[in-house]
Amino acid sequence: MKKRFSGEEELEKVVEGFPKGNPYKVPEGYFNEFPRRLKEQLSQPSFIEVTHRPSRRFIYTQLAYAAGFALLISLGYLGLRMMEPTKVTQPVAKVTAVRENGVYIDFDEASLIDALQNDHNQVKTTVTDNATKDAMIQYLVEDNVDYTTLVEKY
Amino acid sequence: MTEYSDANIVELFKKGESKENAFTLLVQKYQERLYWHIRRMVADHDDADDILQNTFLKVWSGLNGFREDSQLYTWLYRIATNEALTFLKKKRSNIFSPIDNMEYQLGNSLESDVYFDGDELQLKLQKAILRLPDKQRLVFNMKYYENIKYEAMSEVLKTSVGALKASYHHAVKKIEKFMAED
């Protein structure tokens, strides 16, 4: 007689093929220690719920994601920077033509400002120059300019 | 050692004077069963330890209000199951990578888990179980490992026996298919 398997019997046959036993382990003495640890928690003034505390593995995963994300952002930024056209530094002031007698005939304002600025920055020979100053004092002394006037002026 | 009945433990606890002793008895009686129930759901020992602690803290807070019209172990299993499911939900919501998901993470983490001692076939079975939807995984574990009757399971999970049988059927078929893959 042909035997017909019901759904459950068929399932049982499939399940029989699965490996048996418990592959998970616990640290040594875990179940002996657990009631004591729990008691300690209960004796605290207000025990803290720990279920939603992120596990170490979870924290490591999140850190890895954060590091990867930061790396992606950095690479993207670097790529964008490298794709930008290189800026060529143009001289701000450019004299385009000079007449034979040395007079500028075509220049922009910036070149004029720069030229004046450079002129201003140059060290000028003044009366503070020792040689000139001595000569000047000698001249004034010879011309009877009084001491007070000399001090006030120089 | 004398094993106290559930009714005795609850009575002792409710008396008040031996509350802590009664609770220790309860923890000693149920910690292993609840631990393995949780561990098979979350795979990782540290996570299972956290959930088990939280389960018993909730039991401590709620045992005074426990009505003895239901069985103690059913109530304990329900708390442990809810805690495990809440944990998994929370963990799932914290994974934001589109190319990864928690089920794959749980399965793959077993390979480097120092508290996993299975051979290749066991590893494959556990990976298959961890890839099942939560409800199917619960039903499969309770039937396959804990040999809990559908009627008792129905009380814990608040689901009809027919729906539980269907879940178990789907789970076995999925595992069979996964095990047959290379």
Image: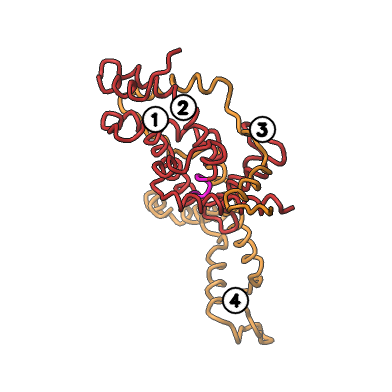
Chain colours: A orange, B red
Where A126 sits versus B105, above or below?
below
| Mark 1–mark 4 distance (CA, rounded to whole Å) | 82 Å
Mark 1 belongs to chain: B
Number of marks in the rendered image: 4
- Residue at 52% x, 55% y is B96
- Residue at 53% x, 79% y is A109
Q: Name the residue that disc number 1 marks.
A: B56
Local crowd size for mark 3, using a 10 Å CA cut-off: few (<14), some (14–19), many (≥20): some
For the residues carrying marks 2 and 1, which lies nearer the camera in this image?
A: 2
Q: Is residue A59 visible?
A: no
Q: Name the residue that disc number 2 marks.
A: B31
Tell me where the magenta segment starts and ends, as one range.
Answer: B134-139
Mark 4 belongs to chain: A
Callout 4 secondary element: loop
Contact between marks 2 and 1 (CB within 8 A): the answer is: yes
The amino acid type of the residue labelled 4 equals: Ala
The amino acid type of the residue labelled 2 equals: Gln
Local crowd size for mark 2, using a 10 Å CA cut-off: few (<14), some (14–19), many (≥20): some
Q: Is residue B157 visible?
A: yes
- Label for residue B117? 3
**Residue closer to the observer: A39 or B60:** B60
Residue B168 falls within the magenta-colored stretch: no
Q: Name the residue that disc number 4 marks.
A: A93
| Mark 3–mark 4 distance (CA, rounded to whole Å) | 79 Å
Contact between marks 3 and 4 (CB within 8 A): the answer is: no
Q: Is residue A138 left or right of residue B179?
A: left
Q: Name the spot of residue A63 as percent of width and height, x first.
A: 55, 45
- Residue at 55% x, 71% y is A114
The amino acid type of the residue labelled 3 equals: Asp
Mark toward the start of the polypeptide (3 vs 1): 1
Callout 3 secondary element: loop
